Structures are given as C-alpha cells and as structure tokens.
Image: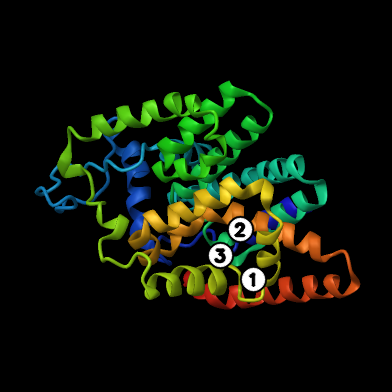
Amino acid sequence: ILLVLGFWVRLYKIDNPIADWHSWRQADTSAVTRNFFKSGINVLYPQGDDLSDVSGNGANTEGYRFVEFPIFNLFHYSMAKLLPQKTLEYSGRLTTALASLVSAVLLFAIVSKKTNGWTGLVAAGTFLLLPYNIFYSRVILPDPLAVTFVLAALLAFEYKNRLLTILFGILAVLAKPTAVFFLLPIIFEFWLFIPILAPFVAWRWWESQFPTGIPANTWLLNGNGIRFKGAFFRWIFGERIVSIILGKWGLIPFGMGILNSQKFGLWTIGALLYLFIFATGNVQHDYYQIPIIPIVSILVAIGAVHMWQTWRGKALVVVSLLLAMALSWYEVRGWYQ
C-alpha cells in the first residue's frame, strides 16, 4: 500500500518539461542522456550542451560534462529506450521515481533488521510521503539514485555480504561522490573503503585530463565563508530541515528520535559531517539535502514509535505528522510550477 501510494504521488506533474525548480541542474543532467542518443553512448566522454567557461580554465568547446560518473544517464537512457513514445523528460523523472521506491524497500529492510518491523514501516512511509522527498524523487538528478545505492550497500553490510557492499558502495560514490559520508556506518571495516573508492579515484584522474569540462566546485565547501555562522544554522537547520523537510511539526518525533537513535549514530554523524563540510553547497542549493532524507526518516520513525506507547503520545504523533505533511507541502508546492 505504501509503495503504491508513494508511486502515485510521484506521478504528479511527472510529464512537466524541465522548467520547474532547479531546472538548470536537471537540464544539465538530461543533456548528457540526450547526447547519448545523438552521438552514441561513451561514458568516458560525457557531453552536455554548455560550451561556456564552466571551470574558470577557458571555454568548454567540446561540451564535456565531467562531474559524477554518468551512471544515472545510463539508467535514464535505458528507460527512454523502453518508453520510446514518452519524452526524455518523462523517462528521466520516472527513472528517479522508481529508484526512490527501491530506496524505500531498502530503508524498510535496514531499519527492520536493526530495530523492528513497525519502525521500518514508519521510516519507509515517511521517506515516501515527505513532500520535499516526493518532489526530489521525480527530478532528473543523480542524487536520488545515489541514495538507492547507499542504502543497498548498507543493507548488504548488515547481512555481512562484503562483495555486494563493495559493489553498491562503488556505484554510490561514482553516482555521487558525497555518498561516501553516508557509508560511514561501515567505517570500522576500513579495508572496504579501498575498493569502494578506487574506481572513483580513477575517474577523478581521468576527469583531470579535461579541465575545461569540470565545472568549478571548490566553492561548494565554504566558498562564501558561511560555515558555522548564524546564517548557516538558520538556513540548514531552521529553513531546510525544520521548515521545508519536516514542516515544523515533524520536529517533535524527529527530536524524540534523536534521543533514542543509538543504533544509527554513525549515520547521523555522517549526515552532519556532510552538511558542515559542504556548507556553501548545502545553503545555496536545497537539493543538496536529498541524501540526508533516509536518516531524517529513520529518526522521525524512531521518535514516532517511541511516542506511540501512550494514548497522549499516539494523538501527538498523528497530529504532528499530519501537520508536518501539510505545512511541508505548502512550502514545496510552488516548486512544480
């Protein structure tokens, strides 16, 4: 029921042209797939349509787009081939929507194993129905797919399958390098990180051969000096997490979850490190919070299940989550326009 409902809400305006919120970044991503159709698939030379000086090293005359390895674009291309009657935009959004459903199943499995089935269900339901995540689970961006790979790696690690942990870890970091922060729960088996990071290091070396095709990116760390300033905390924890993602009222079970989340401490630390290290990127772009949604959903679920033990707690959970969804929707509904 949750998966059907989660898929249904992601069909809202799924046939939009790439002209909604963060259309520039979606267009850059989709352009790589479109050029797969125009020029053939060559993952070592991904091309977009931006010939300008994206790197600060001169004009990008070949239109190269050397950012994350184009794994998402391979999935996007495959979906477009399966649905030739649909637009490339529709295929790209559907690719992300389906990946998010897989993420919900993986999240349920991880949380159920570490806690119990009810907490797993609430975590998956929160992930599927947070209005922020609904919007960003039907965009043409690599981030949601990277979340899927992170969750697959963490689930494989829970079941002590080292080979699948490495495989999905590699895919996660190639799809979005910042995924490494969310693989922190496997840090105690540090040797796993060597094979996980090796393909990414090789990709970075290959990218360096084409400097004009690498968009400037060091500014994402702390380019405007905002890290740990009042504005940083206001934007990340006040505006984004509390207001947009949690709809204010979701802070109640979220806060209770933090107090009872010992089994997910490393995951929470990884999310905080990501927010702090990529300070300017997270403040400037709200889609940078996509990878923290699984742990946010887990903390909300833990808090909600803990509160559910008394009748007053049950009432507060129902009221807070309904208001959270409604107020969060009020914040993001304009993004679809």
Mark 2 lies on residue: 296
Q: Which label lies toward us, 2 or 3?
A: 2
Residue toward you, 107 or 235: 235
Q: Earlier in the sequence, mark 2 or mark 1?
A: 1
Q: Residue at x 37, y 54 (%)?
A: 277
Q: Residue lying farthest right? A: 311
Q: CA distance from mark 1 to mark 3?
A: 15 Å
Q: Looking at the image, is 278 positioned above or below residue 193?
A: below
Secondary structure of residue under mark 2: helix
**Which residue type carries mark 3?**
Tyr
**Label annotation for residue 132:** 3
Q: Is residue 317 above or below residue 30?
A: below
CB atoms at circles 1 and 3 under 8 Å apart?
no
Mark toward the viewer: 1 or 3: 1
Residue 194 placed where, x, y %?
Answer: 42, 25
23 relative to 333 in the view: left or right: left
Query: Can you see residue 77?
Result: no
Three-letter amino acid code of the residue under disc 1: Leu
Residue labelled with disc 1: 251
Among the two numbered marks 1 and 3 on one chain, the one whose residue lies closer to the N terminus: 3
Camera-side residue: 216 or 279?
279
**Do the numbered discs 2 and 3 sit on residues whose CB atoms are within 8 Å?**
no
Residue drawn at x 64%, y 43% as measured from the top left: 102
